[in-house]
Image (cartoon, grey):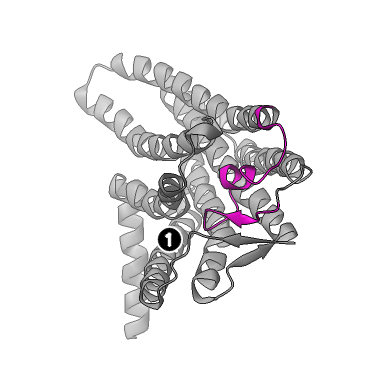
Amino acid sequence: MEFVFLAYPSQPELCVLSFLGVSLIYTLIITGNVLIIVATRTEARLHTPMYYFLGSLSGVELCYTAVVVPHILANILQSEKTITLLGCAIQMIFFIGLGSADCFLLATMAYDRYVAICHPLQYPLTMTLTLCVRLVVSSVGIGLFLSTQLVAFIFSLPFCRARSIEHFICDIPPVMRLVCANSHIHELSVLVAATLAIAVPFFFIATSYVFIVAAVLKIHSAAGRHRAFSTCSSHLSVVLLQYGCCAFVYMRPSSSYYPKQDQFISLVYTLGTPLLNPLIYTLRNSEMKGTLGKILTRNCLSHNN
């Protein structure tokens, strides 16, 4: 049993352009996220909880894109753009699971900023390395657990004879359209999973930022307020991009599903978000910019020697 993807271009010229475009973006994603991981691991002054979470987020996004992008590139070049039933289920488990882990990690990073700004004296005692590791492992573990349960439920349902997926990857909305059963109950199950993975962490982030804003407004110096807000602005930008796309795709009824529109939104959070995250965190963070500059300069000098 196989599914056939319908979203890939059929003209050879478009296939070549698509392959080159996706390859370039994927190269930039790997480069940007690897640089952040190297910077947070090698630079002593970045050995803080905030940068530990940032490095972990980059690691999750490398795995997240590795689940789907090589498969997309292979399908662009192949005449038969298919995937087995088991392959589709495995891809969905890791794609949805690591995407959910992204959401939980962003909530963890909001908690880190809340403790740093609202309880600065308790911050070193609260945000220990042990707690940071546990929070990262829990984020990934809960994300994969939720996705495994959801995918097991979806693939236990009967599929219609038409095995054509109007998408370029195995994602929940297009695969759910192939199910031949009472859709309301299944839609509800997807909504519950999306609420746990998207709405609950977002509510936690929003609550954290209410306390953060209240604490920052109490700071008397303008420089102090600016410094506090600057540490949160990049995180908030990433949150709005990630949660906005995910909520649009997964937290709405299937009656409002439009294949072309969803394919574009999926491209944004499959390729756009992992590409933009390193840029957002680097451009808005002077410490990260300085560290990456030092790493690149050191590498250039070593190559010249």
Residue on which disc 1 sits: 29
Quadrant location of residue 116? top left
Is 73 part of what is drawn in magenta?
Answer: no
37 in relation to 14, above or below: above
The furthest residue to the bottom:
305
Q: Residue at x 59, y 27 (%)?
A: 195
Residue type highlighted by circle 1: Ile
Q: In the image, is 200 to the left or to the right of 7?
A: right
**Quadrant where the C terminus is found in the figure:** bottom left
Establish if 78 lies above or below 95: below
Q: Residue furthest left?
A: 222
Give the residue drawn at x 39%, y 55%: 275
- Which residue is more in the foreground, 49 or 236? 236
The image position of residue 125, as x and y in percent, is 57, 29
Q: Tell me if residue 87 can be seen.
A: yes
Quick check: can you spot residue 107?
no
What kind of secondary structure does the magenta stretch mostly adopt?
loop
Specify the quadrant of the image occupied by residue 194.
top right
284 sits to left or right of 72: left
- Based on the displayed image, in which of its 4 quarters is residue 210 positioned? top left
- 162 falls in the magenta region: yes
Q: Which residues are magenta?
A: 161-184
Q: Residues within 10 Å of mark 1 (few under 14, many from 20)?
A: many
- The x, y position of residue 108, in whole percent, is 54, 33
Identified at 49% across, 71% down, the residue is 76
Left or right placement of residue 300 versus residue 147 in this view: left
Label 1: which secondary element: helix
Measuring from the top left, give residue 137's x and y in whole percent: 66, 43
Residue found 59% across the figure and 40% down from its top: 100
177 or 125, which lies in front? Answer: 177
Which residue is farthest right?
156
